[in-house]
Image: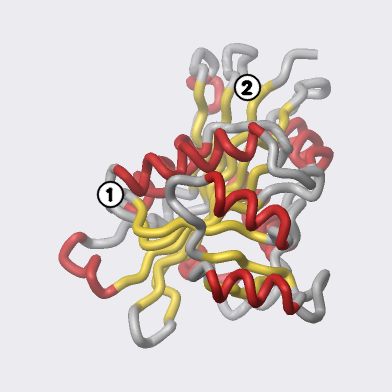
Amino acid sequence: MVSQATQKLYINTGNLTEWNRLKGKFSQSSKSELQKCVDGTLTAWKESVDIQSLKDQEILTCRHEQFPSKISSDSLNDFEISAKIFALSGKSFDVKDALEQVIQELGITKVDNATLSLPPSVTDFSSDVQDIWQMMEQFVDNGHIQEIGICDFDLNQLSQLHDWSKIKPATNSVNLSTCCVIPPELVSYAKENNVRLLTHADLRDILDADYVKTTLNNYFSSENDNWQPIWVARYTALIKHRGIIKSKGYILRCDRIED
């Protein structure tokens, strides 16, 4: 059982390209892939540590140590590094923490592009969205991210973000499963304002809160701990000009919420 002292939990899958049972299976849905990775990581981690020795830790990291994701500094220029941050609630969250975890995991100082995905409950351009975007802008200002983008914004949301922001979104990724044809007005606006329209197949609710709570309580042999997922970060290192995935992984943060 994890001690009540533990209030924050990170689950780090390591490099999925090294997971034998997942090789060649990246075509499955990201939601299904993530759940399998969480289960696999927790199983491997639990077998490799003495949980009782961790009972006084406020922050706990469950890492798949067998498959590190580090990118050699000598070969960094050969890769394009991308990060996608999935916010799992409509409230402002520490996107700085998510981006720092990715940078630390890969052993790099800069991400080429970072994309923000907000949950379906976010339907307007709220102050929470502004807070998150401003934190991402700081990473660009500090030279740790080259460009930032957004997911699934309609014309109204995109125009509000573009007009308000200091650093404009470079991309807006649209899920074609929910939008078979991109609206012509959105296409025109994006073209006029130098926003690249991309497509993706990720669900916005990539991880269910009930799944997280049940899974963590099962692995930690507890019954009523209220673990809540805060964010998921997915990183990808592509070999430039070849499109080959060298490294891919997920990092998940969960907080214990007091009832």
- Specify how the rendered protein is coloured: secondary structure
Q: Which residue is at a point 53% across and 42% down the rendered structure image?
A: 133
Question: Measured from the top left, where is residue 156 in percent x and y?
Answer: 72, 56
Report, in whole angstroms, how far the alpha carbon at label 2 lies from the one at label 1. 38 Å
**Badge count:** 2
Q: Of 103 and 26, which appears nearest the observer?
A: 103
Q: Quadrant of residue 9?
A: top right
Q: Which mark is residue 143?
A: 1
**Neighbours of disc 2 within 10 Å: few (<14), some (14-19), many (20+):** many
Q: Of 134 and 69, which appears nearest the observer?
A: 134
Q: Name the residue under label 2.
A: 2
| Circle 2: residue type | Val
Depicted 126 relative to depicted 53: above or below: below
Q: In this view, does 166 lie to the left or right of 192?
A: left
Question: Measured from the top left, where is residue 200 in percent x and y?
Answer: 66, 71
Q: Which residue is at a point 76% across and 22% down the rendered structure image?
A: 225
Q: Can residue 49 be seen in this view?
A: yes
Depicted 121 relative to depicted 189: above or below: above
**Neighbours of disc 1 within 10 Å: few (<14), some (14-19), many (20+):** few
Q: Of 157 and 102, which appears nearest the observer?
A: 157
Question: Measured from the top left, where is residue 101 in percent x and y?
Answer: 43, 42
Q: Give the residue furthest to the bottom.
A: 242
Question: Measured from the top left, where is residue 188 in percent x and y?
Answer: 64, 76
Sequence-earlier tag: 2 or 1: 2
Q: Which residue is at a point 59% across and 74% down the rendered structure image?
A: 198
